[in-house]
Image: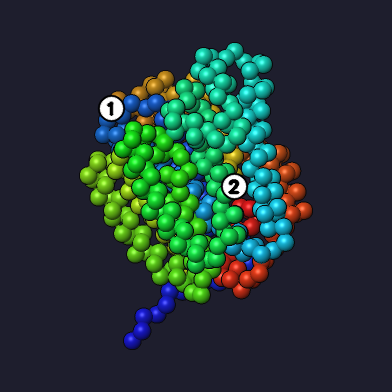
Amino acid sequence: MLAKEPSVRPLNLGSRIPALDGIRGIAILLVMLFHFSYHGGMRPFLFVDEVFFAISYIGWCGVDLFFVLSGFLITGILLDTKGSNNFFRNFYIRRSLRIFPLYYGVLVLLFLVLPRFVPLSSTFHSLLKSQGWYWSYLVNVQIGFDDWPRFYAVQHFWSLAVEEQFYLIWPVIVFLFGRRELIVICLACIVSSIAIRGGLLFWGYPVAAFVLTPARMDALAVGSFLAAMARGPNGLGSLSRWAWPVAGSAAAALSAIILWRRGLYQHDMVVRTIGHTLLTLLFGAVVSIGITSPKRSAFERIFSHRSLTSFGRYSYALYIFHHPIGFALAQKVFSARTIPAFMGSQLPGQILFIVVATGLSLTLAWLSWHLYEARFLELKKLFPYRLGSDPAAANNLAPNYVSNS
């Protein structure tokens, strides 16, 4: 008797995919937990502190999940609109309207406005001297070869540089090659990223192995691979069939690394080589499960939960704001170390810091979205996405045009 094919709910072109917003919400919550735990400065004296610290530290991998989502969504848009009029113009303008206003608005405040009103530290002066790397979206290159900046409140902008470099180059690749060739390119990117990270580590550039785009292309390529596969003859079925086996295998391998290396540390050489690829495979499987789970299934309800989708909707502003907010809160207001310990544990102070920093970040992100970003997003209607020369392929899966493009 033949095995029954997994049930996959149909998606229509142009529809919203709440599960993707929910997965994006998980990504930003992981990153915020990691950075706020760092800024909070808790010293893990007790076992419960150590457990919390170990869990929160894994949050750095939320960036890998962001990369997988970006590869999936952007490649989906490009494949679906390939061959349409103004293919490049519409894509680049819509990306610019989504990304540039907030990013460059923050840079204007940081580099042009703030120095006029606030006394500057020596570390901030060092940041001003290197501001050209931020304006040009090349700060990941500077960090890769000059190490992390002394003023670290905006060091997380390296990942925005990686994504912008991807947005610049990837449309050309999608335009030049067919879907099958693109799948091969994605697989080559996954393999070459491991080799590039290994080479950079061998030659003494560990930070470059973490922040340079060629070294992190495996995450973007996994997402792009999923988008290309979903538009093949089997559509979403091809993703549904392999999602759980890949998730299980990647999770098992990562668990082995955690036991072997006593944690999943971003500076560990094993993690910086094969570990990143295993994470991207796991996250690629999570994305596949999120978009193929039957309606009202447990996973569909989790990924589409309002609390997660809300964080996902404001994730871009949250990502930009949360690090400076955590930095300023710890420097000027309080940290876990300034709160009296409870029964020898600094965990209550750390949790309080995380809650306050999250609330401030979410409030600022909400204001940014409704009072500032939305004004620019309204202009995207002047540059609508249109189906390309192969609308049948596009109908296999709907990219989240409304909230992510």
Badge 1 is on which residue?
Answer: 45
Report which quarter residue 40 is drawn in: top left
> In the image, what residue occupies the spot 42% across and 59% down?
187
Q: Position of residue 17 (x, y in %)?
A: 57, 60
Going by the numbered disc 2, the residue's amino acid type is Leu
Label whose residue precedes the other's in the sequence (1 or 2)? 1
Q: Which numbered dot is residue 168?
A: 2
Report which quarter residue 11 is drawn in: bottom right
Sort mark 2 into few (<14), some (14-19) or many (20+) by Cα contacts within 10 Å.
few
Residue 30 falls left or right of residue 110: left
Extreme residue in the right direction: 382
Q: Position of residue 396 (x, y in %)?
A: 56, 70
74 up-or-down from 139: above or below: below
The answer to whether the residue labelled 1 contacts the one labelled 2, judged by CB atoms less than 8 Å apart, is no
Disc 1 and disc 2: Cα gap in Å? 47 Å
Report which quarter residue 99 is drawn in: top right
Q: Quadrant of the N terminus?
A: bottom left
> Mark 1: which secondary structure?
loop
Name the one closer to the observer, 207 or 338. Answer: 207
Going by the numbered disc 1, the residue's amino acid type is Phe
